[in-house]
Image: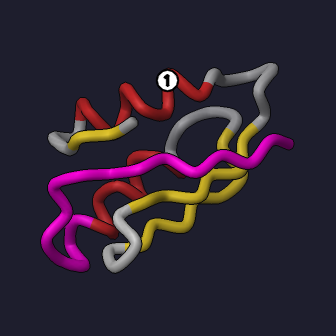
Amino acid sequence: MENSTIKIGGMSCQGCVKNITGVLTALPGVASAEVSLEAGEAKVAFDPQTIARSALVAAIEDAGFDAE
């Protein structure tokens, strides 16, 4: 497993946190995702052989948020 912190912009409420958490945990290869509204980031544990970090960022962006 690999751990990565992804900065997220555009979150304004706990609904956003729940949305992003759901998007990330639904991806194959993602073991866990902890999204923090206060920190503006997601800490994701994932299998790099199954999914790339860039795909995690793309999934967050597809959900309507800024990610880097």
Residue 3 in picture, x, y percent from top left: 74, 48
Quadrant location of the N terminus in the rendered image: top right
Residue 55 drawn above or below residue 31: above
Q: From the viewer's perspective, is 22 left or right of 63? A: right
Write the residue at 58% across / 51% down: 5
Q: Which residue is mark 1?
A: 55
SS for callout 1? helix
Q: From the viewer's perspective, is 21 left or right of 12? A: right
Write the residue at 51% across / 22% down: 54
Residue 20 in picture, x, y percent from top left: 35, 55
Mark 1 Cα shell of 10 Å, populated few (<14), some (14-19), many (≥20): few
Count of numbered labels shown in the rendering: 1
Q: Amino acid at mark 1?
A: Ala
Q: Is residue 62 magenta?
A: no
Q: What segment carries the magenta color?
A: 1-16
Q: Quadrant of residue 27?
A: top right
Write the residue at 74% across / 22% down: 50
Residue 65 drawn above or below residue 37: above
Q: Quadrant of residue 47?
A: top right
Residue sticking out furthest to the right: 1
Residue 12 in picture, x, y percent from top left: 13, 71
Q: Is residue 10 magenta?
A: yes
Is residue 32 or residue 8 the one in the foreground?
A: 8
Residue 61 in picture, x, y percent from top left: 26, 33
